[in-house]
C-alpha cells in the first residue's frame, strides 16, 4: 500500500480547488488578477481599484469606486481599547502585535463574528483600512509618540505613509507605495492564503482566517524576503562589492536573497514595476547608492538567470522601506497591508463552496506492538 501512494511533499504540483482570482504562468513569468495583466494594473490602476476588482470580480465604474473608497475611509478607525492592547504588547515583534490586535478586533467588534459572504466583504473592507492603522499606531507607541490620526483627503497608500511618518508623502512616494500594495495584493495559493482557506474550511469567521494568514506570513520562508534583501544590501555596503559578494555566495553554494521563486522560472513580472520607482525614490531621498548596489547584484547574477535564478518582487521592496526610514521589523507587516484584499477574496471563494480541508498523511511509524507495563520497561 505504501509503495502505491505518491507523496507530494509541500503539496507541490497539487491542485486543491478552482479559483477565478489570479492566474500565474510560472514558465512565462506572467501574472493577472481577474484576467487583467499585472503590468496594466501596476501602471494604470490604484490599490483601491485593484482591491475592488479582487473582491467584486470586475473593475469598478467611477461611481462604484467612489463609494468603495468612501467605505474604506469611513473604516479608518480603531476601538479605543485596542490602543491599550498595542501599548501592552509594544515591545513585541510587529507581526506579533499585528496578529494580536486583529484577534482582539474579533472580540471588540461583534460584527466580525458573522460568517457569510456579505459579512466577509464588510469585515474585509474594515480590516483593509484597520491593518495599516494598527501598524502605524504600533510604530508611534513603541517610540513614545501618540498615533497619528488618519487623513481622509489622502489615498490608502498616502494615508499609510502619513500615519507612519507624520508627514505628507510626495506624489511619487505615494504612488510607489500604491504600486507596492498592488503588486502584493494577490498571488494564488501561497502559504498564507492557503492557510486562511483552511481556517474558513472549518466555518470560522474572516478575522480568524486573517489571524491564521498573518501567523503564516510571519514565517521568514514566506514573508521575510524584503528584510533579508536589505540585510544583504547593508552587508555588501557599496556597488563595487556586489560582484565579489555574489561570487562568494555561489562558491559556497548559498542562495542570493531576492533571486528565484517557487513559481516563476523567469523574472518575477512584478519586479520591473519596482525597479524604476526605487531608482527615482533613491534620488529623491538623496540615497542613490541603495539602488546602485541592487543593480550591481543583478548584473553579477545574470549568468545564473538561465537556471531560474531571476529577480523577484521582494528584491526591490526592502529598499523602498529603507528609504522611508522604516525599521526592518516592519517590512513583513507592510507586505500584509497589500495582501489583505487577496486574503479576503480567497476566503470568499472558499466560503462559496466550502469544504473542510483535510489531507492525509501516510503512516510510516512502528508496526502494531503490544503495550509494555511501566515496571517492565
Image (spheres, rainbow, N blue to C red):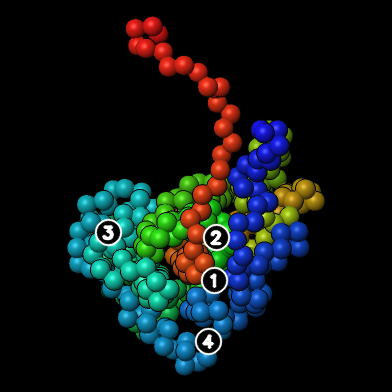
Q: How far apart are marks 3 and 1 (CA)?
A: 27 Å
Residue highlighted by disc 2: 317
Left or right: 367, with 198 as reference point: right
Label 4 environment density (alpha carbons within 10 Å; few <14, some 14–19, many ≥20): some
Task: Pick the quarter of the image with the C terminus.
Answer: top left
Q: Is mark 4 on a helix, strand or loop?
A: loop
Residue highlighted by disc 1: 182
Q: Distance between the residues labelled 4 and 3?
A: 32 Å
Q: Distance between the residues labelled 2 and 3?
A: 29 Å
Badge 2 or badge 3: first in the primary sequence:
3
Label 1 environment density (alpha carbons within 10 Å; few <14, some 14–19, many ≥20): many
Q: Residue at x 41, y 88 (%)?
A: 67
Badge 4 or badge 3: first in the primary sequence:
4
Nearest to viewer (mark 4 / mark 2): 4
Quarter where residue 43 is shown = bottom right
Q: Is mark 3 on a helix, strand or loop?
A: helix
Nearest to viewer (mark 3 / mark 1): 3
Residue highlighted by disc 3: 104
Left or right: 322, with 24 as reference point: left
Quarter where residue 366 is shown = top right
Badge 3 or badge 1: first in the primary sequence:
3
Amino acid at each position: 500500500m505504501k509503495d502505491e501512494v505518491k507523496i507530494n511533499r509541500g503539496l507541490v504540483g497539487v491542485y486543491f480547488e478552482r479559483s477565478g482570482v489570479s492566474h500565474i504562468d510560472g514558465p512565462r513569468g506572467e501574472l493577472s488578477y481577474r484576467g487583467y495583466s499585472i503590468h496594466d494594473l501596476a501602471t494604470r490602476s490604484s490599490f483601491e481599484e485593484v482591491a475592488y476588482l479582487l473582491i467584486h470580480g470586475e473593475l469598478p465604474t467611477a461611481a462604484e469606486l467612489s463609494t468603495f473608497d468612501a467605505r474604506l475611509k469611513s473604516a479608518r478607525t480603531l476601538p479605543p481599547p485596542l490602543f491599550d492592547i498595542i501599548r501592552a504588547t509594544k515591545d513585541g515583534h510587529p507581526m506579533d502585535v499585528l496578529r494580536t490586535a486583529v484577534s482582539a478586533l474579533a472580540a471588540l467588534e461583534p460584527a466580525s463574528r458573522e460568517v457569510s459572504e456579505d459579512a466577509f466583504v464588510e469585515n474585509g473592507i474594515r480590516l483593509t483600512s484597520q491593518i495599516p492603522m494598527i501598524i502605524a499606531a504600533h510604530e508611534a507607541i513603541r517610540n513614545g509618540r501618540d498615533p497619528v490620526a488618519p487623513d481622509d483627503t489622502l489615498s490608502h497608500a498616502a494615508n499609510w505613509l502619513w500615519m507612519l511618518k507624520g508627514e505628507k508623502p510626495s506624489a511619487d512616494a505615494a504612488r510607489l507605495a500604491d504600486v507596492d500594495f498592488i503588486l502584493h495584493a494577490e498571488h494564488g495559493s501561497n502559504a498564507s492564503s492557503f492557510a486562511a482557506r483552511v481556517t474558513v474550511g472549518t466555518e470560522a469567521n474572516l478575522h480568524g482566517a486573517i489571524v491564521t494568514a498573518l501567523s503564516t506570513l510571519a514565517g521568514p520562508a514566506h514573508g521575510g524576503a524584503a528584510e533579508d534583501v536589505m540585510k544583504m544590501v547593508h552587508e555588501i555596503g557599496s556597488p563595487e562589492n556586489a560582484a565579489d559578494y555574489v561570487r562568494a555566495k555561489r562558491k559556497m553554494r548559498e542562495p542570493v536573497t531576492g533571486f528565484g521563486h517557487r513559481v516563476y522560472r523567469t523574472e518575477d513580472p512584478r519586479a520591473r514595476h519596482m525597479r524604476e520607482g526605487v531608482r527615482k525614490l533613491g534620488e529623491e531621498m538623496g540615497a542613490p547608492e541603495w539602488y546602485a548596489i541592487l543593480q550591481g547584484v543583478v548584473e553579477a547574477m545574470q549568468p545564473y538567470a538561465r537556471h531560474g535564478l531571476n529577480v523577484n518582487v521582494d528584491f526591490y521592496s526592502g529598499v523602498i522601506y529603507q528609504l522611508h526610514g522604516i525599521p526592518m521589523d516592519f517590512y513583513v507587516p507592510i507586505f500584509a497591508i497589500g495582501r489583505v484584499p487577496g486574503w479576503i477574496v480567497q476566503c470568499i471563494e472558499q466560503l462559496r463552496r466550502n469544504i473542510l480541508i483535510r489531507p492525509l498523511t501516510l503512516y510510516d511509524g512502528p508496526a502494531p506492538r503490544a503495550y509494555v507495563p511501566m515496571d517492565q520497561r
